[in-house]
Image (spheres, rainbow, N blue to C red):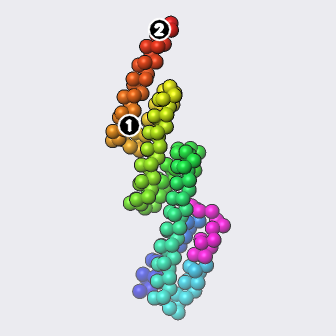
Amino acid sequence: TQQGYYNKLKVAEKYLALAGTLVKPENEQQRLLQKNLDIAKTQAKAKPNLASQKIETIATNSFNSPIKQLLREANQDLLALRLDSPPNKNAIDRYRTILDLQSNNAAAIQGLKNVGKEYIKLTKRAIANQQLQQAENYMRQAYKLKPNSEELRYYQKQLSDAKFDKAVQDSWVQ
């Protein structure tokens, strides 16, 4: 129906606009999608059913394109240990943006779990290097992402023991 076509058109335009805010404006795929959307609008008067199918495809591609781009960027951030900074350009923010767009995105859910694992590794390393304040900061971040982690509870105990040992050592020095 004509109304269904216009609804699909609005969805396609919305997703294409969203894609423009999430990926670089010079993105070739986005330009191609915009061109196809313009063509589909022109064809709509003569062949509404064909145009409707094209617009549905454009809407799907417009929606998936920025999610794929964000996922690539989030994975790169994770590898580079840009876990929670700089603002809006880090693994956590990008994975959460994906989940805001698509709440059941398995890759983003797993990505956040991987960030939690990375914080646990950083916690372990900081404890080993006697950087106890840093270990505590990492642990706080890890708890936000993996609150039920047995491994995290283990390192919480390790951190408590290390703090106690340091306090004992400090009292002997005085």
| Residue 150 coordinates in the image, percent (x, y) | 33, 39
Residue tagged by mark 2? 172
At horizontal 49% and vertical 68% (from top left) the residue drawn is: 64
Foreground of the two, 61 or 125: 125
Disc nearer the start of the sequence (1/2): 1
Q: Residue furthest right?
A: 26
Direction from residue 27 to residue 52 in the image, left or right = left
Quarter that holds the N terminus: bottom left
Given residues 45 and 63, the one toward you in this image is 63
Q: Secondary structure at mark 2?
A: helix
**Callout 2 amino acid:** Trp
Q: Which label number is shown at residue 152?
A: 1
**Quadrant of residue 168 within the rendered picture:** top left
Amino acid type, mark 1: Leu
Residue that extends furthest to the top in the rendered view of this protein = 174
Give the residue displayed 55% in from the left and 88% down from the top.
43
Q: Local crowd at mark 1 within 10 Å, few (<14), some, or many (≥20)?
A: many
Sort mark 2 into few (<14), some (14-19) or many (20+) by Cα contacts within 10 Å.
few
Measured as percent of width and height from the top left, residue 60 is found at 47, 73
Q: Residue 14: in sight, yes or no?
A: no
Q: Which mark is residue 49?
A: none
The residue at the point 52 percent across, 71 percent down is 62
Q: Does the magenta stretch mainly form a helix, a strand or a loop?
A: helix
**SS assignment at label 1:** helix
Q: Is residue 32 visible?
A: yes
- Front-lying residue, 75 or 11: 75
Question: As displayed, is residue 145 above or below residue 28?
Answer: above
Magenta residues, start to end? 22-34
Q: Is residue 94 magenta?
A: no
